[in-house]
Every structure is written in C-alpha cells, then in structure tokens.
Image: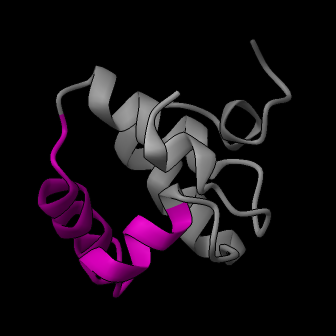
Amino acid sequence: MKERELMRGTKNICGIRIEQLRKQKGIKQKDLLESLALQGVAMNASVLSKIEGQHRTLNDFELLAIANTLDVSTDFLLGREG
C-alpha cells in the first residue's frame, strides 16, 4: 500500500475521490486551484493536499466548486453515486 494511503486522515469522506478523479482526468493541482479561483474559491496547494489526504474539512461552497471543475455531482464526491 502506498505511504499516502496509510497516512489518510478522517476529516472528510470525499478527499480520496477528489484526488482519484483529478488524476484520472489528468488535471494538475495548480489547474484545479486556478479553476477554483475563477469560481471565487481561494485555496492554495497545501490546503488542497490536505483535503485530498482527508486531513481538512471542506465547506459546501468548496465542495461545489470542486465538483463543477471535475464535472461531477457533489453526491458523487460524497460517495452517494457510483
């Protein structure tokens, strides 16, 4: 198992899906951050890394902006859709 997987936190349930989906779509963290900024969500790479590692909670507006950028529903990120 990868070291990052062993070190996952418990602050959110969607970080792992955000990271997996971002990588599947070939989106770099900086590109995701730029898209979030265009939607009025100020976030830096450290915060995004903590979210993806499940070491930081998300606000609803952050979750919505990330879902918009990744072109999925918030329900998908929350594990309510397959």
**Within the magenta stretch, is there residue 35?**
yes
Percent x, y of residue 25: 26, 24
Residue at (63, 72) in percent of width and height: 55
Q: Is residue 33 above or below residue 43?
A: above
Quarter of the C terminus within the rendering:
top right
Instruction: Residue 57: name its quadrant.
Output: bottom right
Residue at (29, 31) in percent of width and height: 23
**Within the magenta stretch, is there residue 50?**
yes
Q: Is residue 63 above or below residue 71?
A: below
Instruction: Residue 21: name its quadrant.
Output: top left
Percent x, y of residue 34: 16, 67
Q: Is residue 49 above or below residue 46?
A: above
- In-front residue for pair 55/72: 55
Percent x, y of residue 22: 34, 37
Left or right, 61 with reference to 45: right
One can see residue 33 in this view: yes
Residue at (23, 61) in percent of width and height: 35
Magenta span dominant secondary structure? helix
Residue at (58, 58) in percent of width and height: 64
The outermost residue toward the right is 80
Left or right, 30 with reference to 45: left
The residue segment tinted magenta is: 27-51
- In-front residue for pair 39/22: 22
Q: Is residue 81 above or below residue 33?
A: above
One can see residue 71 in this view: no
Instruction: Residue 38: name its quadrant.
Output: bottom left
Q: Please state the total of marks drawn on the protein image.
A: 0
Left or right, 36 with reference to 74: left
